[in-house]
Image: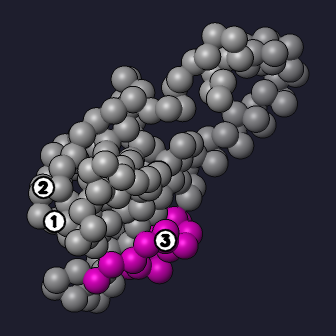
Amino acid sequence: MGLDRFFSRAPIGATLAAAAALLAACATGYGPGGLRPGDDMQAALQQMGQPTGEYVLVDGGRRLEFARGPYGKHTYMLDFDPQEKLVKAEQVLTEAVFATIQPGMTAAQLRETLGRPARVWGVRYHNQTVWSYRYETPFCQLFHVGITPAGLVEDTSFGPDPLCDVDERRGLLGR
């Protein structure tokens, strides 16, 4: 049953309760909405929960990673100064941030910039480990970063997301 049919048949009270629950779920714990520069780290942790990564910044501050969303298409990086006050919050899985990934970066710098990858896999003929990142795009593609055995970024590319593959005999994800 589609949502339009559910909402047209459900009593108005149940519909309003479901809508309120959905809005509450979206408003708390997903993204850093409501947090402002100067807020303390404890307020951020209370809203966002446990980080999926933590990195020490050059100035002595900390960057907290919060991987989120369906299929991991959002990663929020929250930067704090040494006094644990919020300096910046950013969703980093975007083409603008991907453009900052350059050959010669270390795997640690990549992880600090984009967070944990959605998938890690090897390319034997090229002797690389590839980190793949899902992100919001109308083209159903991934961002790939090729890493050498020495732990350095060698190249980047975009490619189709296998989650979008359709096998007409078995439907979506027919593998």
Residue interval drawn in magenta? 39-56
Q: Which percent across, then down, holds residue 50?
A: 55, 73
Task: Determine whether the residue tagged by mark 2 lies in a helix, strand or loop.
Answer: loop
Please indicate whether residue 44 sits to the left or right of residue 159 in the image: right
Q: Which percent across, then down, holds residue 15?
A: 78, 27
Disc 3 to disc 2, C-alpha distance: 26 Å
The image quadrant of residue 154 is bottom left
- The residue identified by callout 3 is 51
Disc 2 to disc 1, C-alpha distance: 6 Å
Please state, as top left, top right, bottom left or bottom right, where the C terminus lies in the image: top right
Residue at 47% in and 80% down: 42
Q: Which percent across, then down, holds residue 97?
A: 21, 49
- The residue identified by callout 2 is 102
Which scheme is used to colour this image of the protein?
one colour
Residue at 66% in and 24% down: 174
Residue 84 lies, with reference to residue 141, above or below; the image says: below
Identify the disc placed on residue 105: 1
Instruction: State the residue in front, 143 or 61.
Output: 143
Instruction: State the residue in front, 116 or 46.
Output: 116
C-beta proximity under 8 Å, tags 2 and 1: yes
Disc 1 to disc 3, C-alpha distance: 23 Å
57 part of magenta stretch: no
Disc 3: CA contacts within 10 A as few (<14), some (14-19) or many (>=20): some
